[in-house]
Amino acid sequence: MNSKDKLFVAPAPHVHDKSTVKNVMWNVVLALVPALLFATYFWGFRALLLTLTGAVTAVVCEAIIQKLRKVPVTVHDGSAFLTGLLLAFNIHVGAPIWLPIVGAAFAIIVGKQVFGGLGNNPVNPALLGRAFLLASWPTRMTGGWVGVKDYAMSGLNNLPRIATNLQELSPKAYELVTSATPLGVAKTLRDSSFVADINAQAGGIDLGGRIFSSLTEMETLRSLFWGNIGGCIGEVSAFALLLGAAYLLYKNIIEWRIPLFYIGTVFVLSLLFGGIPGSGTSILLPFFHIFSGGLLLGAFFMATDYTTTPLSKKGRIIFGIGCGLLTIVIRLVGGYPEGVSYSILFMNVMTPLIDRMTMPKAFGRIKK
Amino acid sequence: MRLKTFPGGIHPHDEKQYSKSAAISNFPTPKRVIIHLSQHIGAPSTPIVEQGEKVQKGQLIAQASGFVSLNQHASISGSVNKIGRFLHPTGSMSSAIEIISDGQNDIIPLDDDPKFLELPVDVLKERIGNAGICGMGGAGFPTHVKLSPPADKPIDTVILNGVECEPYLTSDYRLMLRNSDEIISGLKIIMKIVGANKGMIGIEANKPDAIALMQKRCAKEKDLEVVGLKMQYPQGAEKQLIYAATNRKVPAGGLPMAVGVVVQNVGTAVAIYEAARYQKPLIDRVISITGPMVKTPMNLLAPIGTLYSDLVEHCGGLNGALGKAISGGPMMGFALPSLEAGMTKGSSGLVLLGEKAARSMAEHTCLRCARCVDICPMNLMPSMIANAVKYDDLEIAVKAGLNDCIKCGSCAYVCPAQIRLVQWIDTGKIRYAEIQRNK
């Protein structure tokens, strides 16, 4: 035998499960493909165009900044692509093409590279980009929701059955259900003077209550689940998002604690406090809250971002509950109809503190 | 049988297919052996022979230099060629005695006490101490020390470690199939010495025939129990094994005796039996020569000190270009610079990997994915420790578990950023120990 062979000497362990950063990131991208396909199906090619524009912008910006920083260009790892994709998923299909470009550039440059790139950003870059766009161009971000059918902007396809002549009955109510997302409708109906107004317009019938209860009808929930609603590109179909989430859980790429406690908290709190005066709550109300807006996208794909969430299992539970609590507070009493992105951003900032508070006790250490 | 286990851990492919069906065969007397003076935890042994001196197989050639030290015996007959520095299976150079064979193969005369279980505890302990036995699972703690717990730490349970959770290795498995009676006798001797009334043999589920055989042997023994364990790494780590088998948690920084348990490797049990009955010194052991790069993987009973290169040659040599030679298992073993190391009492295997498997990937930035946190069998935060060591903040490293780490390597195994967590943690441990010494 030849002992002059050069042998590799390295510290143990000498085997590895073959997982890589690249593998993780591209798998998350893959898990978002169903949502992108659903969005393209419902809203057409423009949804695809906006999304890819965001993703490509993010990749280009990351490459440029890494060149300027004189560090290795690592855009092939997929993390920038993912950030750009998620940013675009937070934009609605009627938005101008420059919106995802500006947003993705901001997300990568200010949200990620300024802090040193992958693994060092304090908050989710995609959500930071979205917050930046929302603060800078609020009307572009929320105005002109593009719907898929009559009434379907709000997903309330079943409304004609409630009042075929809604437009004549109460112009104000008609405007609401045709211009806002389902969460926007739910939010507005929490305003009792608004409800009194439309009820008065409708000649005294409880129109507000009827519209509110239509939110939790099976037909509405079905639309929310499959994707027949207005909203951001990535939020179109709960089904598509759950499909992707199941894949990531199966592949052990995301961990169940944050999504479970996030969604669980929203479930419980929306059941307890989600109703409007006069109409009370419904066991279906939590499903409305879970399938609406960006909750599933946020809970499975944004609140599970490795870098910006706690390390310990206990920390992740706290993180999930915190996100759920803030989401419901914003949705029910805050200034916006939707609160997923701000809740996650807020909890991102809390992460170092949570990490410090939840350091696990070593096996065999007595709890002090 | 309900399989037991511990929290955390990983599931690497066990890779035992290479050598598991190879029954133990005897390695012929080698031309030379290198008997290391540090085969164990504790002070190196003191040589009592000189260069040129004739020695007989089984003769004491180096003495324990204190209580926590070990006797070393000649594993072949011949003459002492050199006392000097030789390659140790941990990859570094270390003091050893080189013996060149004279072709004779007679061992020093041995006694036989068929009623060894009736011998007084003192005599049994003395024989074990004389035989130079240390833990044969890898760590190499002197057995006579382990079997002398202080009076205020009563022991009620002895666990034999037949887990062999390291991928590739099959030496303990084949030993259990061949020497089940000796293993059980060894277990009874240990139980008698420490005064335990319960004996357990822990075996991982990937060795169902070993579990079945041991169960058959233990069927009539009320105080003996075979514990089937889930395939999960590091199932064979002492604290994890104790928890899985008895549900007792060894306190941090403490020894198994703190919870009334003594753990011994199955190979050690055989050595204990041979020492108690025949007063035979520990001069040979079973070692797996395995992996994709060896022609005929084997489990060999070879004299201590045999060169790895001789063992590989006996197995038909290499299959192709060798990339990495690992002394021990791939999770905690040592990569050797060459095969010219003499095996020690703790050498359970030599794993030979190809060039592709040997290459290590570049370290990336930590993503904070927390996989290492999720699988750490000691419930630590490996990434946080490694980061703290990197930035020289040992206080945080200690808080995150620096001193509790058992270096099992699970964290580095699952890290998608390929961070060499164990190496960082080890660096931290060394630095921390230095600071403590200088205080």
Image (cartoon, coloured by chain):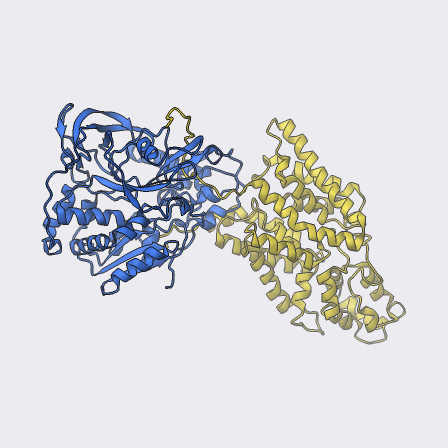
Chain colours: A yellow, B blue
Percent position (x, y) of residue A135? 73, 46
Q: Is residue B277 left or right of residue B229?
A: left
Q: State the residue at coordinates (86%, 75%).
A: A203
Marks counted in the figure total 0
Percent position (x, y) of residue A174? 84, 65
Of the pair A99 and B298, the residue shown nearer to us: B298
Q: State the residue at coordinates (44%, 49%).
A: B10
Q: Quadrant of the N terminus of chain A?
A: top left
Q: Quadrant of residue B104?
A: top left
In this view, A320 is above or below A69: below
Of the pair A220 and B169, the residue shown nearer to us: B169
Q: Is residue B393 visible?
A: no
Percent position (x, y) of residue A204? 83, 76
Q: Quadrant of residue A230?
A: bottom right
Q: State the residue at coordinates (17%, 54%).
A: B189
In this view, B254 is above or below B353: below
Q: Is residue A204 visible?
A: yes
